[in-house]
Image: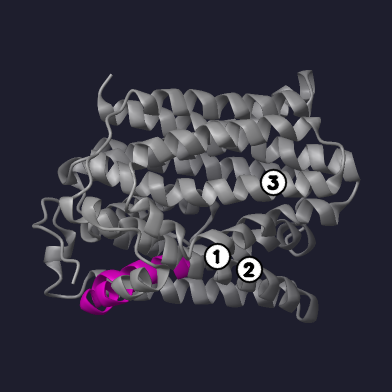
Amino acid sequence: MSRATTLLASFGISQFGDFIYLVAINVYLYQLTGSATAVAGLWIIGPVAALFTKFWVGSLIDRVDVRRWLIGTDFVRALLVALIPLLSTLPLMYLTLFALALVKAFFEPAATTYLTQLVPDTGRKTFNAYRGLITSSAFLIGPALAGLLLLVATADVAIWINAGSFVVSGILLAFLPSVPRPPAVEKSRFADVAADWRTVARFSRSNRFIIAVYVIGLLTMSLALAMDAQEVVFLQTVVGLSVTDYGLLISITGIGSVLGGLTVARFSRHLSLKTLLVSGYSFVATGFILLGFFNAFSGTGFVTFYQNNVPDELMGRVTSLYGLGQSVLHIVLILFVGFTGDLFPLRFTVLTAAGVLIGLSLLQSIAVLLPGKQLFFKEDLPTKRIS
């Protein structure tokens, strides 16, 4: 098994477990509390936990053996998830879920850094395409498996399967090599957080186009997440769909994601980064089947563009610090969309948010197509600048 295949298998197994867990934890928490509010609190735990970690975790990631940290976070997550069915009170449950979110805040920037180090420039687009395909498949199949498990067993079993998926993911990562850090980074001491913020600020000022494309992408994802939080309410109260119809619509989106992932994976070598970014952002708000299909394009293009243009030794800090801003934005937008949905007709709120989303998509497409920016979309790039 090649390194890329092993890495894909590791990430893929944990993602399938995540989607099984996503359904199981909602069911388990509702069975434990009988409160819809308690279940809704799950949406806020992740962004809040990120506020406590992302302003400093990137400084650590850029100075350690990332592979060892990934293995460690996998096993810690396995332990925390395995404990959940053994808890009987809501405070202990939330405390464990908060700890789980803290560990995940370590994992995500570390995973981005490690796969950027391990996968060469020329192979990243294909790797990201297949990773997107696995994520889409997990999105489609994971909830179905969770439903089957809940039918024949209990939520506890589904949660423990997720814990097992983290163990398998960590074992697979143990077969991969560590990537040596650049000498300048290895010899540097653990600098204070303020110095690292200034380093990221200098990089951002020197690479405004890269950061502009990245930030627009983050804004688009944040707004889409805020709309997702009101999606079920809109489709049932405004469109008039039943719960069964809503589930079918989500499945259709999943099918579109899988088809899009297959298309990108099959033709990734023949599709430029510009094509992936422009096609994805141009059609992202067209409809559910197209939403799923073209999200695969925009996701692959966005991640590959970011990996190709941000220096490996700085990636943990850039990912974490901008991720901190994204977490704050997640909380604000989710609360804002929910609040305005109570003040104004929900149709108006959703259409306004969709209009802003279309505007961001057009702005991203224009930025990508600007003349004189071809260097940023090459897949065999020269040494990336940190200054």
Where does label 2 land, which residue?
331
Is residue 213 in the magenta section? Answer: yes
Name the element at disc 2: helix
Residue 264 in view (yes/no): no
Where does label 1 land, which residue?
327
Where does label 3 land, which residue?
97
- Marks 3/2 in contact by CB < 8 Å: the verdict is no
Pick the front one: 149 or 292: 149
> Residue 236's spot in the image, x, y percent?
77, 57
Is the residue marked by circle 3 packed among few (<14), some (14-19), or many (20+) residues within 10 Å? many
Query: Which circle's residue, 1 or 3, is located before the other in the chain?
Result: 3
Is the residue marked by circle 1 packed among few (<14), some (14-19), or many (20+) residues within 10 Å? many
Residue 130 in view (yes/no): yes
> Residue 327's spot in the image, x, y percent?
55, 65
Residue at mark 2 to residue at mark 1: CA–CA distance: 6 Å
Name the element at disc 3: helix
Is the residue marked by circle 2 packed among few (<14), some (14-19), or many (20+) residues within 10 Å? some
What segment is highlighted magenta in the picture? 201-220
Residue at x-position 13% and y-position 66%: 374
Is residue 331 in the magenta section? Answer: no
Task: Give the residue type that dot 2 points to.
Answer: Ile
